[in-house]
Image (cartoon, grey):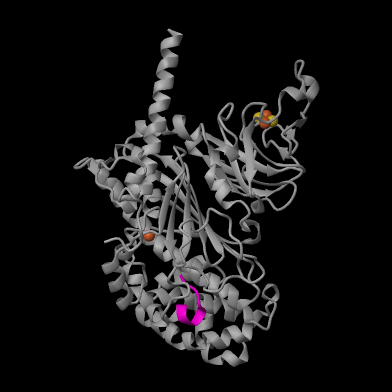
Amino acid sequence: MAHFPKPAEGSWTEHFPQLGTAPVNYEDSISPEYYKLEKAAIFKQTWLNVGRVEQLPRVGSYFTRELDCVDTSIIVVRDRSAVRAFHNMCRHRGNKLVWQDYPNEEVKGTCRQFTCKYHGWRYGLDGELNFVQQESEFFDLDKADYPLVSVHCETWESFIFVNFATEPSETLLEFLGEVATGLSGYPFGEMTQTFGYRAVVGANWKLFNDAFSEFYHAPILHQNQAVASESAKLQQFGFEALHYDLFGDSGHGIVSTWGGMSPPKDLEMVKPIERILRSGLFGPWDQPPGIDLSELPPGLNPARHRAWGADTFQVFPNYVILVWERGWYLTYHYWPLAYDKHLFEGRLYFAPPRNATDRMRQELAAVTFKEYALQDGNTLEATQRSLKSRAATEFPLCDQEILPRNLHKTVADRVQAHRAATETAVVVAH
Amino acid sequence: MSQMLPDDFADLECFAARWSLATERERYTARLASSMPELQELYDAALPRMADALDYLDQFDLEDLPEDARNLMRLFFSVVNASFPVESWKQPRVPDSGAAYLDLVDEPVI
Ligand code: FES
Ligand SMILES: [Fe+2]
């Protein structure tokens, strides 16, 4: 029996008829060939979040990203007027431009210009080639012809996105669509106290996405995280979201969930340290003073439910923004490294702490996040191995697993469309 | 050895050398290297003192904590970390977390 109302069709999934209700094939997660197609059809065509502007505090601040999913390394830098992105490659003879000690590791810092370690060519923050060592030795070299190769880079609400298409098919705002209209105006920029986690996980990138975009698993997998009496209740009740929405064929979607633990109705529902600190998985129980949360942007709490606690916005293909009613947020990235391996990044964003109490509450929220994520993450490598056996290939997903269903479907649609387009191109070329 | 914690917290001094650690990685590593009785001892002694510690620490500017106050803050970060084995897991490691890891690579260190 549903505790929260479902759409007239009887289920969330059937409310979006393009999804179907059939079992889902997971061949897309165990095939090296398929990963190659995903790179070409998705990662090299779409807007990808690479961080937030606060990570580039001043002019000259930069970071590099190693992106296997687009076969390149990039530099993201704050110039006087804009945030820019470039391929991390020197135009002289292709040396990697920005790196330290280990060429395959990401770095960050601040500089006035980028200097190649090899022969000393220098580039401005705008990517222009400004200096060539022994320039007169070259043949008709015009420095204006050799700027760093730029990558399309746009920001929305200080979220930095890049796009590797020659010409992106849509602007960042068009791409984000209802995610942008739903979240614009939220005080993301005031939540500057961050905790950043990272793990390399031996599983396809979509599997962690699946794990974090459904909460059907929560009462079971995470049962020991609650006090025993509460855990029994949660298991009996199971999980139901307040609301789901999918935004056209964008691949983006939202799951809206309750927030009963922050603060709990009854203090006996939570662990002693949570009682003492007034904080836990759902974050500090008290909204941060000094940040105005009285009027939320229209996309939050779409069901307008009084028990609302958090909204998970899935941004296709590999990014998540999770906003908590209590006034903080999380982001996740799932960066593919191979068909069966990815880099998970999770970041928590809080208001700056006013004092030790605020800071200790954040510590409990950040540590709790890790305890949960370790449980979520560890099942994935085993799942990957099971799936690889192909002992079974199709899996029934329930109505609370609509976001995983939508992700796999959108990936399949994009790959299919790309295949069709490239086959046509081949035919035309013949 | 010289005193690490403020006088008011002399009762916790015996835990400071081992648990006043700057980063989450060090605290988590210390937790995994401890037995349950050791974690329980820290928890039992320190948890009832959490409120006092925060009252004491709240009088300072967080950016500019005196050395002994910073040690106290870090000790209680460890208490937060140790609370999971004690309150939830009955073992130092997250159950079923196997070889999984999650590194806090970017944190506001006190
Ligand atoms: S490769 Fe960069 S200066 Fe030669
Ligand atoms: Fe989970």
Residue B75 x, y percent position in the rendering: 53, 79
The single residue placed furthest to the front in the displayed view is A8
Query: Was residue A278 drawn as part of the magenta stretch in this picture?
Result: yes
Residue A264 percent across, percent down from the top left? 44, 76
Q: Is residue A146 above or below residue B27?
A: above
Estimate the x, y position of residue A204 in percent, counting from the top left: 37, 44
Give the left or right position of residue B39, taking residue B2 as reference: left
Q: Can the viewer see residue A203 in this picture?
A: no
For the residue pair B100 and A78, the one nearer the viewer reads as A78
Q: Is residue A422 visible?
A: yes
Compare residues A142 and A213 and report the one nearer the observer: A213
Q: x and y percent of residue A232 in the render?
A: 28, 73
Residue furthest out toward the top:
A430
The answer to whether residue A37 is above or below residue A353 is above
Q: Residue at x 51, y 67 (%)?
A: B24
* A421 to A96, vertically: above or below: above
| Residue occupying the point 33% across, 46% down | A13
Furthest residue toward right:
A136
Quadrant for residue A265, please give it. bottom left
Q: Is residue A236 magenta?
A: no
User: A361 left or right of A257?
Assistant: right
Instruction: State ligand 2's quadrant.
Output: bottom left
Quarter of the image with the N terminus of chain A is bottom left
Q: Which residues are magenta?
A: A274-280
**Residue pictured at 42% horizontal, 81% vertical:** A267
Hey, which quadrant is residue A376 in on the image?
bottom left
Q: Residue at x 53, y 82 (%)?
A: B16
Quadrant location, the C terminus of chain A: top left
